[in-house]
Image: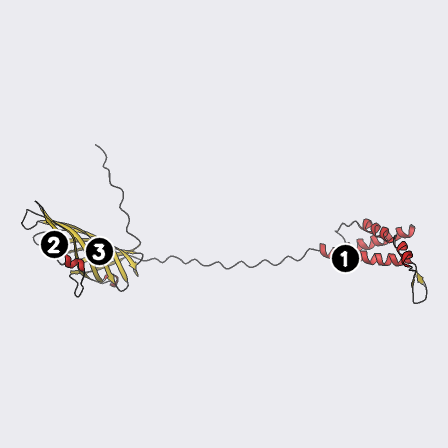
């Protein structure tokens, strides 16, 4: 019993030494467990007919000493493995943050003042609505035309607004029946086409007599290569032509606000 107690103390000391400072290990309990297991070996040895292990000098080592030797080695190997498992692994170096994708800054597109001309009946252009003409009616104080078609040649100092325009127009010519009208109001739709894309929109205006002069207001929205642009044009000229000025600008035309309600008196 004293020999086993000494063995336990020896194993306990070895385990404490391997654990090192800062680690709390119940080495005594582990050594005592090994001692209990080794106490069973003499019975196993008797059943298998084993005896002492020979030494080079011919002296035998007691089975109990051999058992203690083997058990001590097993405990130390096991405890060494536990120490390795308990040793914290080196933390992996943090990955470098991925490079942020640069967000492209929006490009400023300034408005551009334009000027040019528009002339009726674009040369070499055939268009069915222009040939069919309008639905005409004569009333007491006006002549009405609905849906008449026409073509125009636009020539501007900015090539984005140069091309062939197709127009459908409705108008009222105001004046006494069967006499020359004294004024005109008109509305219409228009598409201006060139190699880069097209412009679609609306037109409206009026005509005065003496001499006969038309005043045009045209609103256009770009498509195709002109996508994202709008244009406002104002033209003045005799029937069949006009001198035009205007503005090309980015974005859409602002919507009209709600109708005005004048305050009650």
Name the residue furthest bottom: 56
The residue lying furthest to the front in this view is 47
Residue 213, label in figure = 2
**Could you say whether the residue bearing mark 1 is in a helix, strand or loop?**
helix
User: Dot 1 corresponds to which residue?
Assistant: 80
Q: Position of residue 46 (x, y in %)?
A: 91, 56
Q: Which is more N-terminal, label 1 or label 3? A: 1
Q: Relative to 95, is 88 on the left or the right?
A: right
Classed neighbour count for the residue bearing mark 3: other residues with Cα under 10 Å, few (<14), some (14–19), many (≥20):
many
User: Reading the chain from its start, which is encountered first: label 2 or label 1?
Assistant: 1
* Quarter occupied by residue 236: bottom left
Q: Is residue 260 above or below residue 232?
A: above
Question: Is residue 38 among what the camera can see?
Answer: yes
Look at 85% across and 58% down and name the residue there.
Answer: 70
Mark number, residue 190 = 3
User: Which is more N-terminal, label 2 or label 3?
Assistant: 3
């Amino acid at each position: 019993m004293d020999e086993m107690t000494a063995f336990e103390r020896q194993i306990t000391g070895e385990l404490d030494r391997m654990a090192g400072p800062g680690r709390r290990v119940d080495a005594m309990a582990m050594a005592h467990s090994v001692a209990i297991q080794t106490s069973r070996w003499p019975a196993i040895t008797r059943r298998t007919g084993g005896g002492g292990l020979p030494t080079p000098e011919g002296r035998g080592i007691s089975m109990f000493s051999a058992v203690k030797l083997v058990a001590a080695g097993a405990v130390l190997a096991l405890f060494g493995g536990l120490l390795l498992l308990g040793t914290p692994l080196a933390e992996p170096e943090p990955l470098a943050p991925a490079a942020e994708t640069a967000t492209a800054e929006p490009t400023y597109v300034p408005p551009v003042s334009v000027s040019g001309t528009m002339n009726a009946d674009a040369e070499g252009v055939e268009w069915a609505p222009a040939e069919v003409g309008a639905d005409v009616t004569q009333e007491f104080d006006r002549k009405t035309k609905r849906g008449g078609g026409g073509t125009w040649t636009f020539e501007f100092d900015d090539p984005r607004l140069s091309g062939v325009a197709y127009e459908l127009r409705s108008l009222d010519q105001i004046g006494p029946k069967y006499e020359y009208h004294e004024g005109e109001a008109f509305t219409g739709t228009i598409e201006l086409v060139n190699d880069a894309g097209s412009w679609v929109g609306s037109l409206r205006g009026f005509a005065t007599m003496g001499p006969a002069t038309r005043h045009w207001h045209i609103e256009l929205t770009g498509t195709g290569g002109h996508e994202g642009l709008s244009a406002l044009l104002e033209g003045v000229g005799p029937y069949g032509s006009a001198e035009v000025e205007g503005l090309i600008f980015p974005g859409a035309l602002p919507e009209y606000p709600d109708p005005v309600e004048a305050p009650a008196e």
